[in-house]
Amino acid sequence: MSASARFGFASAAGSTGDPRLRLLTQHLPGDVVAVLFAARDAGASEDDQAQVLAAGLQEYYFRGGGRRAFGVAVGFTGIEGVDFGVL
């Protein structure tokens, strides 16, 4: 998937990064996609669906699937576009 949105950061140490527009491309595993589609099918709002994407991008793009950036929380706002593809 690729997403163009504003991303900001906060860590347990209290440092923050002001949200800035970024274009990210990241493979998200099936469990994240399943949660996203289940939320959509249940009538979740766009904001709720964006939170599912934010959690997936936080874990797999910014934290590297649990290999780095422990304790970093990512804000995902100002979404300009999201594009999905199937591998």
Image (cartoon, helix red, strand yellow):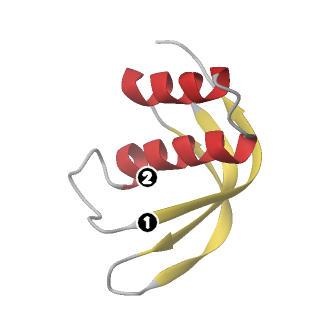
**How many numbered circles are shown?**
2
Which residue does the image show at 43% across and 66% down from the upper left? 73
Which residue does the image show at 38% across and 25% down from the upper left? 31
Q: Is residue 71 placed above or below 63 in the rendered structure?
A: below
Left or right: 83, with 33 as reference point = right
User: Residue under circle 1?
Assistant: 73
Q: Are marks 2 and 1 in contact (CB under 8 Å)?
A: yes
Circle 2 residues within 10 Å: few <14, some 14–19, many ≥20? many
Classify mark 1: helix, strand or loop: strand
Is residue 86 or residue 41 the one in the foreground? 41
Q: Is residue 31 placed above or below 67 in the rendered structure?
A: above
Q: Furthest-bottom residue in view?
A: 14
Residue type, mark 1 in image = Ala
Left or right: 14, with 47 as reference point = left
Residue type, mark 2 in image = Gln
Residue 87 percent coordinates (x, y): 46, 12
Left or right: 54, with 64 as reference point = right
Residue 24, located in which quarter of the rendered image? top right
Q: Is residue 72 placed above or below 29 in the rendered structure?
A: below
Quarter the N terminus occupies: top right
Residue 48, located in which quarter of the rendered image? top right
User: Residue under circle 2?
Assistant: 58
Measure the alpha-carbon separation of dots 2 and 1.
7 Å
Residue 59 percent coordinates (x, y): 36, 48
Q: Is residue 72 visible?
A: yes
Q: Is residue 29 visible?
A: no
Classify mark 2: helix, strand or loop: helix
